[in-house]
Amino acid sequence: MFTVAALYHFTRFASPASLQEPLKQLCTEQKITGTLLLANEGINGTIAGPKAGIDAVIAHIRALPGCDDLEVKFSTASERPFARMKVRLKKEIVTMGQPDVDPKARVGNYVDPQDWNELILSPDVAVIDTRNDYEVAIGTFEGAVDPETASFREFPAWWEANKDRFHNKKIAMFCTGGIRCEKSTNYLLGQGVPEVYHLKGGILKYLEEVPEENSTWNGECFVFDGRVSVGHGLKEGPHELCHACRRPILPEDRNRAEFEEGVSCHQCISETSDEDKERFRERQKQIALAKARGERHMHADVTDES
């Protein structure tokens, strides 16, 4: 079993580039794979490996400026969920594209998982899922509003177009691990919304702590690693990844006429040209050759919640 650590922390890094190489070197030494994003506003990512290695990397991150109170969500995976280790420099650790948004200044009211059900079932509360459309498609909370956004960058425009729907409502928001809500709650407070709440620790913490019999969560939670989805108790879900469009599919979707390994699925077959599909087929051949040589190949390591 591999230990998986999902983390983010907003803090001010004066020189993210100076942190990149030591962090990558430590991860390599400890046989850790995954992706970590560094920006002036902090750190975000998901990593996996042996528990001792994960502990060493987390200790290193907590020693970085302003990261001593870093919170981490731990889970396990039966197979290594990432093929390689990447430490990337970014403008934002989660991309919203709103320069005035600053989670370090203020955020919405945190709601512990044990108190979440009572809040969202209140008639004066509107619950908004801040995740991407393909994530919402495989699971969400009962009664949650789906903005149907393809990326988090689209959320501000969606809010501007739909804000009148939520007049005189308290707003409760949630996302996978909590990072998108740090920015979205700050954004709504800046837009004049008086009462904004968000699920502390995100869906992952809720699924870890709230028993299934008491849960208001329906379906699975998309995760940004090779497991693709997890359910209650953070057990690995049934989903796989279409390596053409990076959306989750179920094993039975492989039997659909639209499915071709690495080329298309029922969700994306009409979105790409014949030329694209030929390119994907060539890529798939290279993946098959690598596998035949006994080399691990993963088309996409996705950890940037954007």
Image (spheres, rainbow, N blue to C red):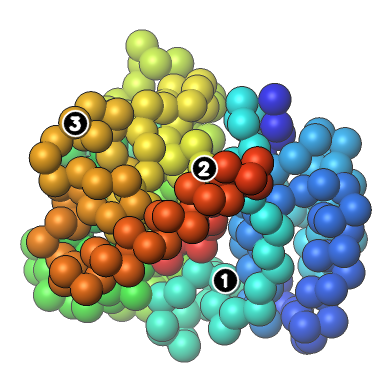
State which mark lies toward you, 2 or 1: 2
Q: Which residue is mark 3?
A: 255
Q: Nearer the viewer, mark 2 or mark 3?
A: 3
| Any part of residue 170 in sight | no
Near-viewer residue (70 or 257): 257
Tell me which label, 2 or 3, sits earlier in the chain: 2
Rendered location of residue 20, percent (x, y) = 79, 74
Q: Position of residue 245 (x, y in %)?
A: 30, 58
Q: Tell me the residue that label 2 is attached to.
A: 226
In the picture provided, is 10 more to the left or to the right than 211? right
Q: Which residue is mark 1?
A: 93
Say which of 86 and 57 sits in front.
86
For mark 3, does the 10 Å Cα neighbourhood hold few (<14), some (14 to 19), or many (20 or more) residues?
A: few
Q: Is residue 86 left or right of residue 158?
A: right
Q: How far is disc 2 from disc 3 in space, using C-alphas? A: 21 Å
Q: Earlier in the sequence, mark 2 or mark 1?
A: 1
Instruction: Write the residue at 33% across / 59% down.
Output: 281
